[in-house]
Image (cartoon, rainbow, N blue to C red):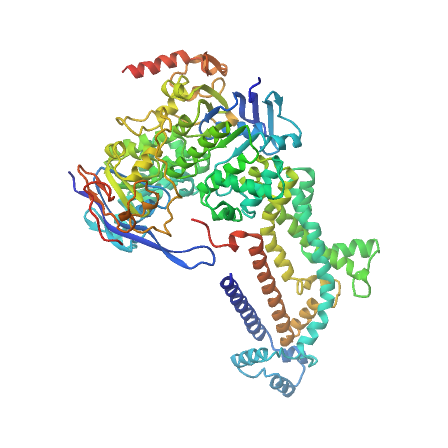
Amino acid sequence: MPQLVSIAGLSVAFGGVPVLRGVDLALEKGEALGLVGESGSGKSVTWLGALGLLPRHAQVSGSVRLEGREILGASAAELDRVRGGRIAMIFQDPASALNPVLTIRKQLCEALALHRDLQGNGVKAEARRLLDLVGIPDAGRRLEAYPHEFSGGQIQRIMIAMALAGNPDLLIADEPTTALDATIQAQILELLSTVRRELGMAMVLISHDLGVVAENCDRVAVMYAGRIVEQAPSNQLFADPVHPYAQGLIGALPPLDGPRRRLTAIPGTVPDPAHMPDGCAFAPRCTLAAEPCGLAAPSLAPIADDRSVACIRAEASRRALLGVAAE
Amino acid sequence: MSPPLVEVSAVSRSYAMRSGMFGRSTAVHAVDGVSLTIAKGETLGLVGESGSGKSTTGRIVLGLEPPDGGEVRFQGKPMAAPGTAAWRAQRARMQMIFQDPLGALDRRLPVATQIREPLDIHGLGTPAEREDRVRELLRAVELTPAHGARYPGALSGGQRQRIVLARALATKPNFLVCDEPVSALDVSIQAQVVNLLADLQAQLSLTLLFISHDLRVVRQISTVVAVMYLGRIVEIGSADDLFARPEHPYTQALVSASPAPGRRSAGRIVLSGDPPNPAARPSGCAFHPRCPRAIARCASEVPALAAVGGNRQVACHLVAGAATRDAA
Amino acid sequence: MGRYFAIRIGRAALTIVLVVTFAFVVLRLSGDPALMILGPEAPPEVLAAFRKAWGLDDPIWFQYLDYFGAIAKGELGRSMRDGRPAIELVLERIPATLALTLPAFFFKVALGVPAGIYAALHRGSAIDRAVMMTAVAGFTVPSFVLALLLVLVFAVQLGWLPSGGQDSWRHAILPIATLSLGGAAVLARFTRSAMLEVLGQPYIRTASAKGVPWRRVVTSHALPNAAIPTVTILGFMVGTLIAGAVVVESVFAWPGVGRLLVVAVANRDLAVVQCILLLVAMTMVTSNLIVDFVYGFLDPRLRTKGAHA
């Protein structure tokens, strides 16, 4: 049986400037994959590009297969069936994610009418059920309300209801809680994991927050400057990161308990996509970088059954980490 | 223990807010009877969600906003009236940095000019001394004179925040209010700025009021942490202890909601209900509608902040040792 | 909602009073109607009699109160030139003006709005650039230049159309074209930028992400939002229906309100000028009120009680 989604060599450029530089990613049915990285790493662009949601002037190449069927460059009609029907997406900014001049009912029923075989009252009943499901109280009345009458957390719930409308096999959640307060973030993450469990849906959780991804995903891919640099089961990645960038990210995160230590900041800044360094894009900021790092970009290579890393100094990096741990 | 540099006693601040375009205006208590002391060289972390009043508290402490009630004392003296010479002298001793460095900088001026600006305003030193001071400040925030010649648009977010920091330090203040200074930055850059801030604090013996929604960052930099909810402090204590053993149900939920690598969400306290709305403050303990442990008394009586042992104070009826005060 | 409109209407009335007051003061200070109408050669006694007859020798504040008192009674004064009621003079010119401005308004909307939408949807294409260049040309060229250009080409060179007058529908073509082109250019640019702004909003991406076909994204998600700012400019255009053709009417010798205004100002025919200004202020203010009302209809954020918070 083919994988649910398999992405190969996905590249995106804006006006000749590459922002995504060959991403390979596969996703099994029902799996929760986390995608972490800093701004500009390409984690959102990967999925916007895969689903044809980027502006027209973006040049997208590579391959995106949904159960074996190529969807990159598919007809508009086919893409419209995939989007919302097979793969749904929710976004970060609750304030502007919903159309301000349309009622919740219109926006929710629109998704239902597109992807489900429902008629008349059936549509509205299903809309009410979905709002109930995501925990919007008084669903029947609230359907007639407009987006500005809801709080950020409620909007994100409605977004989830809308995403579920098409019974998708995969939900892409792009920074779904970044704009929300901590206690509301916890609510939304719990809701996401509940509906995912109940519906057997796969999920890609895109986040800059390592903690959010670690807690909610089976597997994590770390992105840097338009490439995946490390992929591993989440418990392994956080316990034992191999790529120096992954190590750096984890080291930069202040701990919430235990002794306080000085943060290990990654020096420098993310490279400008228009002036990518030769070879490994992380080399200029990497404490372990050696001469060969500047020669060619390392490819993502397996280091264990379910782990892979794109670093020619992976072994050295691992030793360095063990050395630190032994101190 | 050194005497407090900043003493905030029972400050309150409310705004008239109109609900919508046609609604009537209601008084919103942004800050309600907040008292704090910050000892010299210490960092007080102020955490809370949106609407908790933490930013307003920061602005009151700095004298950017007058409190409706209560008083702020700086170095033992009350804040001077805005616009007076005494006020200007006081203001040079205290500075503020915000979340958005691009908004705080003028895009049309080279950043070195902007770092020098406070020196020009307060007339500190000769022009040559000011130039030296700007170079020194750039070095202090780990930038070079070449960065100083650039415009804000040509710097990264982390570099801009360093420039804002350099400008804030120009007048050699001893007190800094930092309002979400690293929230807009990526994790790796955030760590650079947090480390830099800690270094500068040690070198210059700065006192900080550090406002953030991010518990991890606050713990990293603070000595004492105060947790705010709907304009009041609900818990205050030493940074390590507070997050390790939160007493107030709200602090417990906040700590529990903070995701951690290597921990799955099992056992997490997930609060029900919407985020607090300052315009519709619940009676009694403002947290009671969302509190998993609330009892009848919580809806009618406002719990007062009371010591519960150590240097911890908690405002909760359910925490042993906490006293009550009359319903507001 | 009621309070909202009460405030708007109050403000509108105040605007009208201010406009009329301003016109009153400026006109009184800018020249002596007696001299203008009777000529500098007129004997002093005649001038004095004229001033007395029209109340021009009263103090200005007295004249002002007198004027407002008359307005309250529905009296808008008489033309100093031929003694006819000013309102009558103005009203008989209105159909001629509307004969130009109404069709022009229709063409502005019919041309400008679709051109702007099309340009936004095909941003950066050759057609977008062509529309934008035309639009920039259309509103940087003053209307009298455009009018003269059209006359040169279609009346003088080609001889297809008359260059002035009001004898047949063919006489109306060039003035209408002049008015339409300029307005369409403004509308096209405005609609394009409103549309681009909306197309960049996250909710457009949300709609695409749920599988709404692009055509429907444009019609049912983008257009209703882009309509909100566009209504402002449309309202402004409605407001200029009565007096928006001053220049064009002068160039094409079209006997409308605009030309009446020019002549009346030149003669300091105070009552007529004030009557026209009052009418203009009232149409402007009314169209603004309509715009506010339409906003409430288009934008639920203004209709329902404030944000949830």
Residue beneath the point at 74% across and 63% down:
C99
In the depicted view, which residue is nearer to us: A120 or B107? Answer: A120
Is residue B122 among the parts visible in the rendering? no
C207 left or right, relative to B282: right
Q: Could you tell me residue C239's position as x and y percent?
A: 63, 62
**Outermost residue toward the left?**
B1
Q: Quadrant of residue B202?
A: top left
In the image, B36 versus B158, the foreground residue is: B36
Residue B67 percent across, percent down from the top left: 29, 53
Residue at 69 percent across and 68 percent down: it is: C257
Q: Is residue A102 visible?
A: yes
- Name which quarter of the figure residue C217 lies in: top right
Give the vertical position of A83 relative to C225 (above or below).
above
Q: Is residue C276 left or right of residue A178?
A: right
Pick the residue in front: A319 or C37.
Answer: A319
Horizontal and vertical percent position of residue B25: 40, 58
Above or below, B319 against A296 in this view is below
